[in-house]
Amino acid sequence: MPDERDEDLVAGVRRGSREAAEQLADRHLRACRAVALAIVGEVAGAEDVCQDAFVYAMGHIDDCRRPARFGAWLRQIVRSHARNHLRDGKRDRMVSLDAVDAPARGRSAERADLRERLLAALRTLPEERREVVLMHDLEGWTHREIAERLALPEGTVRSHLHLARKALRRLLDGLRADLKE
């Protein structure tokens, strides 16, 4: 079953196959997590959003008009759930520091400040660029994997990554110097 195409797995879910649903979840979890994290900004909230979105998607599987594009359909549901999560105030307005690194317990106030500056800079990026930079630099995805999961040309992924990094460098000017001190 691991080599089955998404459209075959969607057909299996429509017939009631729990195994097909699990395979779809396994296949698309990383991309969904990166999308949710890019919007919500904290790991726990992103995990909640992904779980809620997947349950919703399985309950509305008949609404997936293009099963071969299940991943794109699911990520759109994740985006919608993540925005609802923010709108409904299901998180603190301050983004958790665990989105980038372990909590700052026991670390200096300076390190926490630098981490906050990084998160603030990430929040300024357009959503799609934030998704790409998080998938690539935080999750370790290749350009091709990101392109496939986000249904973008690989060149567009490279461009988004370059522009996101350029913006982050500009916004975080002096961060490297602060880290060395």
Image: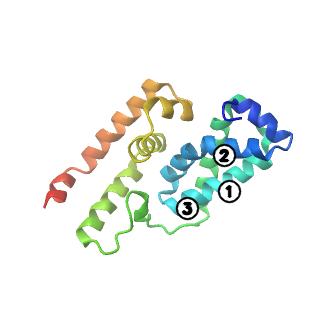
The three-letter code of the residue at mark 3 reads Gly
Q: Describe residue 171's horizontal placement relative to residue 79 as left or right.
A: left
* Disc 3 target residue: 45
Which residue bears the numbered disc 1? 52
Vertical arrangement, residue 7 with respect to residue 36, above or below = above
Q: What residue do we see at 55% from left, 50% from top?
A: 33
| Few, some or many residues within 10 Å of mark 3 (<14, 14–19, 20+) | many
- Image quadrant assignment for residue 64: top right
Q: Which mark is residue 25?
A: 2
Horizontal side of residue 15 vs 89, given as left or right: right
Q: Secondary structure at mark 3?
A: helix
Which one is earlier in the sequence, the residue at label 2 or at label 1?
A: 2
| Secondary-structure class at tag 1 | helix
In this rendering, the label closer to the viewer, 2 or 1: 2
Q: Is residue 108 left or right of residue 161?
A: left
At label 1, which amino acid type do we have?
Asp
Residue at left offset 30%, top offset 46% = 168
Task: Residue type at mark 2: give it.
Answer: Ala
- Could you say where residue 3 lies in the image, as x and y percent from the top left? 66, 30
